[in-house]
Amino acid sequence: MSDLSPADGAVLACATGHRFDVNRRGFASLVLGSRKLIGDSAAMLDARETFLEHGWYAGLRDALSGLVAPEQAQRVVDIGCGTGYYLRGVLVALGAAGAAGARGRPGEPVLRALAVDLSAAAVARTVRSGADASGVSTVGLVADVWSPLPIRDGAADVVINVFAPRNPAEFHRVLASGGLLAVVLPHPTHLQELRAAGLALDVHGNKTADLITSLAGLFELESTEDLSTVLSLAPADVAALIGMGPSSHHQAESEPTTAQDSPAALEERSEVTVAFRILGFRRAAQ
């Protein structure tokens, strides 16, 4: 398949005859072949939206936005967009920083964002949440990050990747020369209380080292920032926190928890450590 271009209204087409409809929710699905991986479910997205909109991870969104804002990027790709919470923060920060507004053409959006996820429900939410943003064009793409991404070479000034799978070679290809890759990983102490109680999956201790190794030769590490805080969460917040991430898959596959083990049976408020590592990588020339 060659490059896609708009054709006949809400249709993307290539010179060899492939055609993909852009649906009413504002995104196209370019997942080809069999799909062995399953994206986030609507229930997981509901839990994530509930938890994030309460502001529990606002510090993380602010730190990520602070890393990206100095780039004055015009084209942002969010790989693993989820509900669009972090992308919205980044776009607001870029808009406030000027986002190269002097170079924008009259009548055209200053910022262009592409929200990518394997979950069609996630992409739809992200596009819907950014639909009313002034000066921003947000479109969506359902795609598998483990496969070649249907994005043109050098199409992005910034790629953000928050708690999501990574494809180093493809990230390098779609980023413009000197572009920024911003990655967020869970710190080894993330959710340590819930993990000790058997309610959350363990965090691999060498995630940062593995990431740097996987990006070697393609990206150069420029910055690392650790964030950590202890939240006092009500039982409903704990339930949403568990239900919004990979631990929800684990719970669904394991034996049902007893009433004593369930989040609702925890103390009235629970102290939970949330800890993150934010890494900024610069695209290497190679």
Image: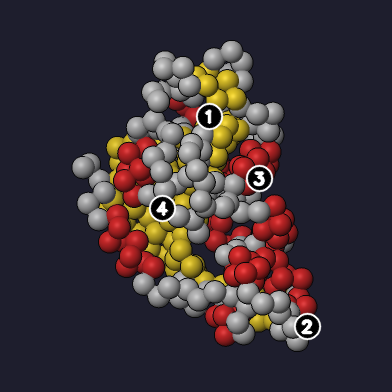
Q: Amino acid at mark 1?
A: Val
The percent position of residue 258, horizontal first and vertical second, equals 74, 83
> Residue 20 occupies which quadrant of the picture?
top right
Q: Residue at x 40, y 25 (%)?
A: 1
Mark 3–mark 2 Cα distance, whole angstroms, equals: 31 Å
Which residue is disc 1 drawn over?
A: 110
Q: Is 16 in front, or is 188?
A: 16
Give the quarter of the figure containing the C terminus. top left
Q: Is residue 51 visible?
A: yes
| Circle 1 Cα neighbour tier, 10 Å, few/some/many (<14 / 14–19 / ≥20) | many
Foreground label between 3 and 1:
3
Q: Is residue 90 visible?
A: no
Q: Secondary structure at mark 2?
A: loop
Q: Residue at x 38, y 55 (%)?
A: 280
Q: Amino acid at mark 2?
A: Ala
Disc with the residue nearer the chain's start (3 vs 1):
1
Which residue is disc 2 drawn over?
A: 259
Q: Secondary structure at mark 4?
A: loop
Which mark, by number, is residue 166?
4
Disc with the residue nearer the chain's start (1 vs 4):
1
Disc with the residue nearer the chain's start (1 vs 2):
1
The percent position of residue 111, horizontal first and vertical second, equals 52, 33
The percent position of residue 23, horizontal first and vertical second, equals 65, 29
Mark 1–mark 4 Cα distance, whole angstroms, equals: 27 Å
